[in-house]
Image (cartoon, rainbow, N blue to C red):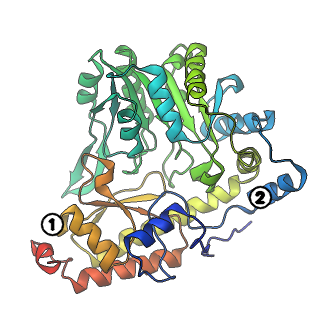
């Protein structure tokens, strides 16, 4: 079956977070401008999900609703079928999202003042999940390798990780796998080495695998649970969701797998303490339809994203020689290096939003190592990306920003 990846959903006035943010940054943007920021898709939802929600609405009362056996079965079967690990029903705890799940885990498995390790540049709610719960952010920055002789690629600094994990005050590592925003799909060897370090130092790994389905051709996602022995499952909490994969973040459905019974109980206690109850009633039928009926839609989506990435990379290499598009292994988010323009973060953001009319995610929000980068959402119709690239190239040429050197500061004064 061939799905519709060409229609532009009209999200203006719909309450979309990223569309609202675009109009706040630049109220004069036209109706033809599509933001390529927050990680939801500028694409129609899979028709199977829409049909399932219509059926549910026709036959259900929208009262408080617990997770059904069909929901649990769909979540577990997806992990077994798509990612090759044996997710057990009893391990699953529901959450309205991975972000609140991270906060629950931080509170459940550490004490105020304890250290929580994150790997910047990384999805910014990781930091806020630590800071807002009165814990200490401990950074294990990723290292960018390569460069002049080849494409840059990020790696885990294992020596630094071992040093941070050895500090007994550091209790957790929040791992992003695949990594947002740098687009790495960690190998089984990398994951095993990371897990060994954490187990040896009694550091719990809370693994955000929300992008696990969004892996580009030639790459393979390895679930952290797939490299662990059964006796090590108690050292891992895995956060999953259909929201990124099938564009249903508004349904607020996540499945958190906690194999250890005591940890599961501690996590549930934190949910109760914060009055987190049942999911949105639509979360269950949407998830069931997504996991049971939409695998072929996902396969076609990945083809679209990969084609969009190749278009972006090729266009920028041809027209903007001082800009580098980093390799994309996973997620639908391109990580693009604009440091060659020698602009401050404020200048780069102003150029994007006021001159190029591009509304992206600014690299600095992802923490250490993100300054001078932009994250570009590739989950959009090809035509939308073509228009965005044209605006970027035209504005850059008008301001001389494609020239090597210090001219960026001059032209934006």
CB within 8 Å, label 1 to label 2: no
In the figure, 313 relative to 168: above or below? below
In the image, taking residue 83 as reference, residue 395 lies left or right, namely left
Question: What residue appears at the point 34 percent right and 27 percent down from the top-left corner?
Answer: 135
Question: What residue appears at the point 15 percent right and 74 percent down from the top-left corner?
Answer: 408
Q: Pointer 1: residues within 10 angstroms few (<14), some, or many (20+)?
A: some
Residue topped by disc 2: 48
Res 185 quadrant in image: top left
How far from the left and from the top, in percent, is residue 328? 41, 56
Residue topped by disc 1: 342
In the figure, 141 relative to 366: above or below? above
Name the N-terminal-most of marks 1 and 2.
Answer: 2
Question: What residue appears at the point 37 percent right and 26 percent down from the top-left corner?
Answer: 193
In the image, taking residue 192 as reference, residue 237 lies left or right, namely right
In the image, taking residue 234 as reference, residue 172 lies left or right, namely left
How far from the left and from the top, in percent, is residue 365? 32, 52
In the figure, 125 relative to 333: above or below? above
Name the one closer to the observer, 116 or 335: 116
Res 345 quadrant in image: bottom left
Res 226 quadrant in image: top right
Question: What residue appears at the point 41 percent right and 82 percent down from the top-left corner?
Answer: 28
Q: Please identify the quadrant where the C terminus is shown.
A: bottom left
How far from the left and from the top, in percent, is residue 278? 69, 36
Structural distance between the alpha carbons of marks 1 and 2? 47 Å
**Viewer can see residue 317:** no
Q: Please identify the quadrant where the N terminus is shown.
A: bottom right
How far from the left and from the top, in percent, is residue 58? 88, 56
In the figure, 113 relative to 21: above or below? above
Q: Pointer 2: residues within 10 angstroms few (<14), some, or many (20+)?
A: some
Identity of the residue furthest to the right in this view = 59
Considering the numbered disc 2 on the image, is that residue within a helix, a strand or a loop? helix
Considering the numbered disc 1 on the image, is that residue within a helix, a strand or a loop? loop
């Amino acid at each position: 079956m061939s799905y519709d990846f060409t229609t532009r959903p009209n999200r203006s006035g719909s309450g979309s977070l990223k569309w609202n943010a675009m109009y706040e940054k630049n109220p004069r943007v036209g109706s033809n401008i599509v933001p390529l920021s927050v990680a939801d898709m500028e694409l129609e939802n899979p028709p199977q999900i829409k049909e399932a929600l219509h059926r549910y609405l026709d036959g259900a009362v929208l009262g408080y609703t617990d997770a059904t056996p069909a929901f649990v079965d769909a979540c577990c079967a997806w992990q077994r079928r798509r990612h090759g690990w044996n997710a057990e029903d009893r391990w699953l705890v529901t959450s309205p999202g991975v972000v609140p799940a991270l906060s629950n885990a931080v509170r459940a498995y550490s004490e105020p003042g304890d250290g929580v390790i994150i790997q910047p540049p990384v999805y910014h709610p990781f930091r806020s999940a630590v800071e807002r719960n009165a814990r200490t952010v401990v950074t294990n920055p990723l290292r960018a390798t390569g460069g002049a002789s080849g494409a840059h690629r990020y790696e885990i600094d294992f020596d630094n990780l071992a040093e941070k994990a050895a500090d007994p005050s550091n209790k957790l590592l929040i791992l992003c796998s695949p990594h947002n925003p740098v687009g790495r799909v960690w190998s089984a060897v990398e994951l095993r080495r990371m897990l060994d370090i954490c187990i040896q130092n009694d550091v719990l790994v809370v693994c955000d695998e929300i992008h696990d389905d969004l892996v580009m051709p030639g790459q393979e996602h390895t679930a952290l649970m797939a490299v662990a022995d059964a006796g090590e499952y108690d050292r891992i909490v895995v956060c999953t969701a259909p929201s990124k994969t099938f564009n249903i973040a508004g349904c607020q459905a996540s499945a958190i797998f906690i194999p250890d019974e005591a940890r599961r109980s501690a996590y549930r206690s934190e949910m109760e303490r914060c009055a987190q109850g049942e999911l949105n009633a639509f979360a269950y039928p949407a998830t069931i339809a997504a996991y049971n009926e939409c695998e072929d839609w996902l396969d076609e989506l990945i083809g679209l994203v990969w084609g969009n990435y190749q278009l972006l990379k090729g266009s920028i290499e041809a027209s903007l020689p001082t800009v580098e598009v980093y390799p994309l292994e996973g997620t639908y988010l391109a990580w693009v290096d604009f440091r060659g323009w020698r602009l401050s973060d404020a200048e780069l953001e102003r150029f994007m939003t006021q001159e190029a009319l591009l509304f992206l995610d600014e690299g600095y929000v992802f923490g250490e190592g993100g300054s001078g980068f932009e994250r570009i959402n590739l989950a959009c119709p090809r035509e939308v990306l073509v228009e965005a690239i044209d605006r970027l190239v035209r504005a850059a040429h008008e301001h001389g920003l494609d020239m090597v050197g210090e001219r960026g500061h001059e032209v934006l004064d």
